[in-house]
Amino acid sequence: MLEYLNSTIYGNFTIKDLLISIVTLFLAIVIAKIITVNLKRALKEKMAKEHLEILGKIVYYGIILIAVISVLHKLGITMTGLLVAGGVVGIAIGFAAKSVIGNFISGIFLMIERPIKIGDQVNIDNYSGFVEDIHILSTIIRTYDGLYVRIPNETVFTSAITNYVAHVARRFEYVIGIRYQDDAEKAIEIINKILDMHPFVLKNPAPQIFVENLGDSSVNIVVRIWAPTKVWYSVKTELLWKIKKELEANGIEIPFPQRVVWFANELKTKNKRKS
């Protein structure tokens, strides 16, 4: 068997052939890199970033594959022999590379289905952040803390994916408590005016403002707001402070928690007076 593989895989080649093959591979890598970079520049405004990345990888590895095949032919290495050897080695490697194959297949499905794109803000396997890259075997996440996280594509494909920017609009809400002596209708009117004046608060879907419940120390008003996904977080952090300041400027305050404490002696005194 070994003699057969040796005779079919290895042909006759000289040192000169070997050197030419090495130079050919080196030039192929350089040319593939140059073509990929120029291709990305040319199509930057015409294709989505994630599609451009996939096209670039196909072109890059395609050029290298063509170069490898030509080099093998130059060295007299037959493809038939490689297939036979590959079949023998593939069986042995297959058991050891089960996870690699799973990640590879999952990566292909992710590229077809495209639940996430490069630049999206996502939560995958309890990691939240920006999608930095989608490789054939893994997906790279840059967390909000700036950490580099590599997640195997099999995990990505089988996990629940939360994509924070897949839709054009996103909702957030506040629960604002006011004192019982304050006018809740006036407070709702003030909040409505603030939302109407803000350029990024969407009119459709319209904001919702209503009294949700009567708490121990406050009347709780729920404010639900829709904003464009790209500015969602900045709108959320900005509006709450504006609402607080405007309510206080109109004499409506957010109360502190209050508790009524009765002492035993005071209860006895009151009971005596009643009797």
Image (cartoon, grey):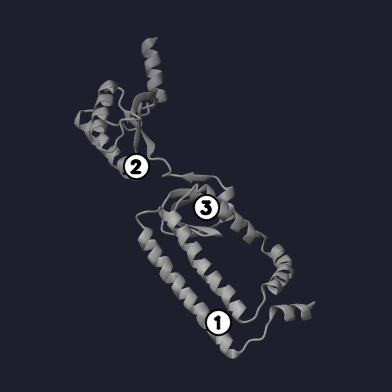
Q: Is residue 113 left or right of residue 101?
A: left
The x, y position of residue 241, in whole percent, is: 27, 39
Mark 2 or mark 3: which comes first in sequence? 3
Q: Is residue 110 left or right of residue 190?
A: right
State the image quarter where residue 263 is shown.
top left
Residue 47 vertical placement versus 203 (above, below):
below
The x, y position of residue 165, in whole percent, is: 41, 44
Q: Residues within 10 Å of mark 1 (few under 14, many from 20)?
A: many
Which residue appears at 57% of the width and 75% of the height?
70
Residue 8 vertical placement versus 261 (above, below):
below
Instruction: Identify the residue under disc 3.
Output: 111
Element carrying mark 3: helix
Report the disc number at residue 232.
2
Mark whose residue sits in front, 2 or 3: 3
Q: Is residue 184 left or right of residue 65?
A: left
Residue 103 vertical placement versus 23 (above, below):
above
Spatial separation of the CA atoms under disc 2 and disc 3: 27 Å
The kind of residue on which mark 2 rests is Trp
Instruction: Identify the residue under disc 1.
Output: 21
Q: Residues within 10 Å of mark 3 (few under 14, many from 20)?
A: some
Q: Nearer the viewer, residue 270 or 179?
A: 179
Element carrying mark 2: helix
